[in-house]
Image: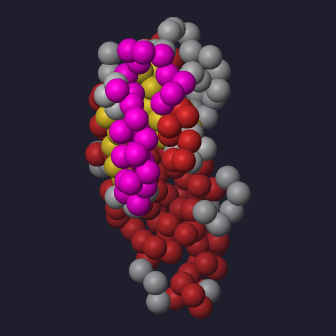
Amino acid sequence: MPSSTEPGSTAEPATETRAVILVEGASDQRAVEVLAMLRGRDLAADGVAVVSMGGITNLSRHLDQLAPGVLVTGLYDRDEEAWVQRALARRDAPVALQVCDRDLEDELIRALGVAGALEVVEARGDSAAWAILCRQPFHRARPADQVLHRFLGTTSGRKIEYAGLLTAAAYHRGCVPAPMDAVLTATAG
């Protein structure tokens, strides 16, 4: 299973994999790896792999590939609850998945608040792009948190980049979303 101290890396772990954090996509992987790094954790040395499944529909396949005795935790979106429960019902070993209310980006936006998240947008130099999106007729009357969520997915690579930036901001402000904290705590060795 891939793991590394470099966020987004797919290098082989330095030790045998003893725990896996399954996440839906690359932005979730980036967020978890950045948080681990900020907390001084070397996941590879700890035998922990953060695995992007390429979507929740791949959960069963990833669970089937794990060796017996590997601790399994991870993140999923609340709307995927039925899918997750079906996948877990076919597995004998315990799996401690953490649910994100909408998704991890939503958790980060709520943790920071819209104003805090927009500070990250400004620091990144994306204020002009944010203003353009806000002026579009569809977004003018929408709540700022929903527009911000949309903003993260409008440009290729932005969602992954902001996953790391928002996670770092949440870490430094002491407001890391509970699901992210839980998966790292569960894998602490």
**Occupied quadrant, residue 154:** bottom right
Viewer-proximal residue among 82 and 29: 82
Please tell me whether residue 74 belongs to the stretch shown in magenta. Answer: yes
Task: Locate the C terminus and report the quarter of the image it occupies.
Answer: top left
Viewer-proximal residue among 128 and 34: 34
For residue 173, say whether it is visible: no
Residue 149 percent coordinates (x, y): 50, 66
Please tell me whether residue 166 belongs to the stretch shown in magenta. Answer: no
Residue drawn at (39%, 68%), measured in percent from left and top? 114
Q: Is residue 143 above or below residue 29?
A: below
Residue 184 percent coordinates (x, y): 35, 31
Please provide the residue range marked out in magenta: 63-92
Give the total of numbered labels.
0
Q: Is residue 31 above or below residue 43?
A: below
Furthest-right residue in view? 156
Viewer-proximal residue among 37 and 56: 56
**Residue 129 falls left or right of residue 76:** right
Q: How is the image coloured?
A: secondary structure
Residue drawn at (64%, 79%), measured in percent from left and top? 132
Viewer-proximal residue among 37 and 70: 70
Residue drawn at (54%, 84%), measured in percent from left and top? 139
**Occupied quadrant, residue 14:** top right
Task: Locate the N terminus and report the quarter of the image it occupies.
Answer: top right
Furthest-top residue in view? 15
Residue 57 percent coordinates (x, y): 54, 47
Residue 175 percent coordinates (x, y): 30, 49
Residue drawn at (61%, 78%), measured in percent from left and top? 133
